[in-house]
Amino acid sequence: MQYEESAEVWRNRVTEFTYLWRMAGTFVQDATLRGLLENAFEEGICRSFLAGRFEPNDVGLAEELIRFHIQDKRGHERFYETLQAARRAQDESTAPEAVQPAHHDGGRKIVAISMVKNEMDVIESFVRHTLDFADQILIADHKSTDQTREILENLQKEGLPIIIEDVADARYEQAEVMTHLLQEAAETYAADLILPLDADEFLVPTGKTSVRTLLEQLSAEEVHAIPWRKYVQQHAAVTSPNTFLLSVPLYRAADNDKGQKVIVGGELVRREHVPLVQGNHGIIRTNKEAHEQSIVFGNLAKGMEIAHFFWRSPAQIRSKYAVGWPNIVAKYTVNTTSGGSYREAFGRVLRGEAPDMNEGVRQWKQCDLRGSVPLPELRYSKETEPDVLANVMASSEALAEELAETRALSEQPLVTTIVPYLGDDTAFNTSLASACAEVYPWRELLVPVMAGDLTATLASEVTGQGVRILDEPSALLSSVHGKYVEWLLPGETVKPEKLRRMVSCMELQTLPYPLLLSDAGQAYSELSPYIDVGVEAETNLQQADCGAFWHGLLASGKFPSRGLSGLLMRREVFEACHGLLDGFADGRPHFLSLWRTLLRTSGEQPCRIISVMRDDYTGAAPEPSLMDIAAHQLDWHALCVEDGAQLDAATKAKILDRQRRIGIYLLEHALAEGSDLQSGIWPAYQQMLVTL
């Protein structure tokens, strides 16, 4: 006899079906029959929950099946979803009255800082909770390979006050990164109090007073100790991923964890250099008179503690140890006091032992924070089950890359970075700041003044950063001493790790490439002057003959979107190009002419190959104006005339047709925008179109 899913017969049958499931697992020897019975009893439990009016104890009984009998969620998705809905309904029925968000009107600026890696299952809860009492969060992303970065960027787009930075090193430089964020919070963002927190650490009240109110009572001149202890969700296995971490019943360890965390006063940081110790367990203060250093954590702050959610799921804890310990070893070796119990935990993961959430906890006590903190809704955390293997593979690749870089840079090859001044102070400052932020220690920075006048004030600021100004561009050729040369034109930016990655690549390759290009792999419209190679995944590092590469650029009338900033050249090429000075007529760069000079000269080197990386280490290409496009079209036309012998008739016909179509578009839109076609570059451009 069959019954509909909503039939009365299914109600209050969870206990019965759970008992039958256990009996089948214990006494039925035939695996096929046992599987059929368990599937039937699983369906019965689902229908009993869906029929409604189940007992409070029913959810716990079904959860025990997951804990002891179901090893893999795959194949049991309906069971998990049904149980999640039942648990959510039961938790909501017992929830205390909601707490309203804290008011940030105490006159204090509170900034949280955090370094994160692969925290997608907790990062949104952490950010939303922390911003209830903090005015801003500075987050350093340590090469996350899961959805952590995507979630953070979505939160940022939502308008939340988050600053996201990148950690270039694969090693676990936690103390150094957090100390940098500490100083940045104090000096750049004028924080009165700074809260160093990990993404699995939630600052919560232990009484009725809100965390914000308690923080506003702390001195900005001192460091304050905060107790911490382990917390876990009571029903983590069946809690929906898109559920705020504190919005369900919890277990709280009966005892505090050893040591403490700290909150640091902004005035103290502005007055002294006080590095954070590994793990944010204290600060280092220096007694200059006695030449002594000591670790300080201050007096214990009352009324709050850090809820440390070190365990969220078996997959999460395996990923934490499998990735975390090798990163610690890369910095300290296996013999280190840092990392606590990570080495032993890593060994258990390696041996395939099941993680134990009770490790290090004498006793768990029930806890419910729903009446003590606001409970925001999550928007971006729907699929957050960590992929342990994927995280380990990505981490191992990063560590291997760092090892190769260490080997490549052992001889400290010097790089010359050139940031020309072309008259635009804002664009120049943008590129100079980007150049100064590159994490490559062996280089010289040159600023040739190629157009306009560098003001005395700006010149003073530049030289104060250790940059050499060349008032005469002709002095550039004799001023370059680096083995490699990098250009950053005004407005261009690069990632901090660009030089380290590209120099290492050049140093370790079998062939002495004259040019190495960082490629964005993007597609652009016909009107755009940009083109990218689009390195194939199977190729990884693509090679091309310099002459053939130039022929392709000439035929398309486009140049690599990352301009000169995406390029690293050997000094021999730079010198053979006479410093590229001929490519800056009229105080502006003529990109196609620059690329022709570079590729023709490189084609005369012993190795005539340009190599293209699939990784992009530069900022986005600027959006060209109509006048920029017109100037580029003029340059392209002139080069087609000069190098026309390299082009066959079919290619010339395509070029002519494209130049005409672009010309009509540019003139129509220039008129629509109210441009004066009798001034600037427009008369020369119109004359070019007449000749076509």
Image (cartoon, grey):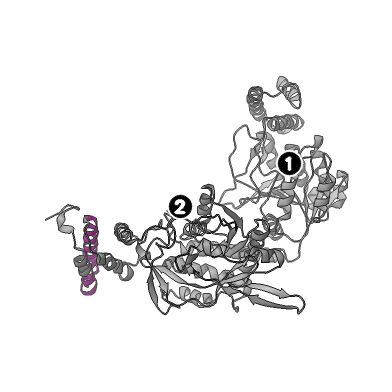
Mark 1 vs mark 2: in front: 2
Q: In which quadrant will I find the C terminus?
A: top right
Asked if residue 476 shows in the view, the reply is yes
Q: Is 17 placed above or below 150 here?
A: below
**Residue 246 lies in what quarter of the image?**
bottom left
Q: Which residue is mark 1?
A: 595
Principal secondary structure, stretch drawn in magenta: helix
Q: Residue at x 59, y 34 (%)?
A: 525
Determine whether the residue tagged by mark 1 lies in a helix, strand or loop: helix
* Cα distance in 3D space between marks 1 and 2: 44 Å
Callout 1 touching callout 2 (CB < 8 Å): no
**Amino acid under label 1?**
Trp
Q: Position of residue 457 (x, y in %)?
A: 82, 47
Q: Is residue 43 magenta?
A: yes
Q: Position of residue 74 (x, y in %)?
A: 34, 60
Extent of the magenta region: 22-50
- In the picture, measured across the screen, residue 121 lies left or right of residue 501, that is left
